Each structure stands twice: as structure tokens, then as C-alpha cells.
Image: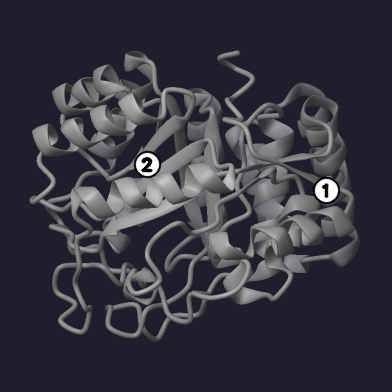
Amino acid sequence: MKISDLICRLETVRELSPDQWIDLFGQWQAERDPSILALICERARLTKEKIFGNKVYIRGLIEFTNYCRNDCYYCGLRKSNRETDRYRLDESTILSCCEKGYELGFRTFVLQGGEDPFFTADRLRELIRQIRQRYPDCAITLAVGEHDRSAYQSWFDAGADRYLLRHETANENHYRRLHPEHLSGQNRRECLFHLKEIGYQTGCGIMVGSPGQTAECLADDMVFMKTLNPHMVGIGPFIPQHATPFAGESPGTLEDTLFLLALVRLMLPAVLLPATTALGTIHPEGRELGILGGANVVMPNLSPLNVRKKYLLYDNKICTGDEAAEALSSLKKKMSAIGCEIVMGRGDSPLVI
């Protein structure tokens, strides 16, 4: 089938067979036809608008620790990176970030960090409990990696609503290319199913253009995401970090990332889909183009100014400007210029409303 026919089929039945996915990605990678990209982004935008209208949901991101026990080959926070200026926000600082965000109108806080042993299950549970007590009308999202089910359950019981855990890749060979031997792709995917079973609004996702990623890898990712049926999907381009084993690898492209965003929107029409900071890093209008291609979430940064440049997952991360919560009015204007409206409420998934 031609790629346009495959896109039409996806829009109609919301899934493809593994072989059809491989065919679609193979054709795209061979041609990267701008007219195909324009077509799929338009179909994705219309699909999004049928459910969400022109709304773009906003989340307040708090990057509270850049310590990590893992050594993933692509990540600037990896424990072997001796160049990273490590930090942890204390409890009062995190609560202050929430207070500032609440005053600005944010009703979702995203606590993101490396897998930092300092933040034990009990310590994080107490932090969540305090945020929930102070801001009962807000959603609390966690993005703190792989943990056992009992920890996930305790955080959910304390008041956490959502959990973001990019699966990175559903292809085992590709997973081994990206991670040390002691980490398991199967365990990571099982964590996602545990999170959904507990009751979290659950998010998975991938890096587009990561080293070793093939059409077959992407096909496995799409099949996995369809099976999981997540509430959220985080997709951004791979961007190398100079102090990692992948320092010399080529970054993912804007076009490939927009193509994947649009495909996910067509496959999962009701999904919450961020236009990521990484997308804004590789192109000055990356987030706007992501929104026009089917995304409907942005996450300005509520972290203290003095640590934002220390949370460097990849090189050249934008750390000033519209990703900062202080520039909220500018972000609203940019979204308005493309016909979209920033919504400051919780913005829960339609799958749980």
C-alpha cells in the first residue's frame, strides 16, 4: 500500500498490523515527502480538534533532582557523567515552586527527576501528601522512573494522579543498544501496566531518531502503545549529550518527530500529547509545529532559575524564554497566534472523565 493509503487506513480503523507499520515507516524513511508530512499533520490536527477543540493544556514542571542511579547511554543525568552539577531541591523549595505555580494559575504539577536514592518511597510519599493537602484541586504527576509496585501504590494512595514513564523502545535489541545490561525493557513495560492497573493516568513514549532505531523498532513501539492504550504519550527527538557514549550520534529531526506525533494522534485520538522542550530545542517554532501536528500539552518550567541549566538531559536545552513559567503570557500569545487557547485547569484525560 502507498503511504497515503496506510495513513488513511490508520485514521479509519486506528491501528495497523506490524507489517503495515514497517511498510509505512520504511516508505517515510526512504522519501520523507513534505506533502505526506503536511497531510498527516493536518489529519492529526483535525482528529485532535474533534475531541479537544483548540485547547492546549498546560503543566507546571518541577525538575527536583538531577541525581540518578542509572547509567543509560543517552542521558546527561547518567551516574557516570562527572560533568553534571548535581542538585536536589529540598521539600520547602519544591512546595514553594508549587505555591508559585498555583498563584500563576497552574493546576497540574509535574515532579520530574532521576532515580535518586535519596528520595525514598516514604520521603516522596510524604512530599506528595503535603502537595495534595495544600492543593486539593490540582493534579500531581510523577516522572521518577522505575520502582516496585508497592512504591507506585503508596504514592497513588498519597494523592498522585498521573505517572510519566517513557518506555524508550519496545524492541529488545534496540533497548540493549540504549541501556546497560542490568536494566530490562520488559521490566520497564511491566511498570507501565502496573501503573495503569493501580489507577494512574499513565504516560509512555519514545525518543525519535535514537541510535539504532529502525522501521522495525518504530513498528514495535506503535504496537506496544496501542496495546497499552495510555492516557499520555511523550514523544521528542533524540538530542545527544556531549558527556555520554552517544555524544557523536546524529540528533532526531523535526520532520521525523512531527510524523510520529501525528501518527500517535491518529492511532490514539483521545491521548494527551505534549509538544516537548526537546522539540522546541531543535527548532525555534518546534512546539508550535507540534501543536499544529496533533499535540495538545505544553509544560513550562516552575523549577528555580538557578537549577534549570543543571537538568541537562541533552545538550543545548532551552533554559530561558517561553519554556519558563515567567513567560506564560508570551506562550499564551504564541498559542493564540496559531489559533489555540491555553487552558490552565487540571486537563485530565478524557479516558477517565
Q: Are marks 2 and 1 in contact (CB under 8 Å)?
A: no
Residue wearing tag 2: 165
First-in-chain label (2 vs 1): 1
* Residue located at (62% from left, 47% from top): 22
Coordinates of residue 47 in the picture (x, y in percent): 82, 33
In this view, the residue in front, 27 or 311, is: 311
Q: Secondary structure at mark 1?
A: helix
For this view, does 248 lie left or right of residue 81? right
Q: Is 282 situated above or below 189?
A: below
Please give the name of the residue rendered at 77% of the width and 66% of the height, measured from the top-left corner.
32
Q: Position of residue 335 (x, y in %)?
A: 79, 55
Q: Residue at x 21, y 78 (%)?
A: 85
Residue 170 appears anywhere in the view: no
Q: Which image quarter is the N terminus in?
A: top right
Q: Secondary structure at mark 2?
A: loop
Residue 239 vs 154, above or below: the answer is below
Viewed as shown, does residue 303 lie left or right of 119? Answer: right
Residue 134 rendering spot, x and y as whole percentages: 35, 30
Q: Report x, y in % for residue 200.
A: 39, 22
Which quadrant would residue 281 be assigned to in this image? Answer: bottom right
Q: Which kind of residue does numbered mark 1 sit on?
A: Ile
Whole-Å distance between the Cαs marked 2 and 1? 26 Å
Q: Label 1, on which residue?
A: 40
| Residue name at image x 54 percent, y 76 percent | 320
Q: Nearer the viewer, mark 2 or mark 1?
A: 2
Quarter holding the C terminus?
Answer: top right
Q: Is residue 90 something that shows in the picture?
A: yes
- Disc 1 crowd rating (10 Å Cα; few below 14, some 14-19, many 20+) is many
Amino acid, disc 2: Leu
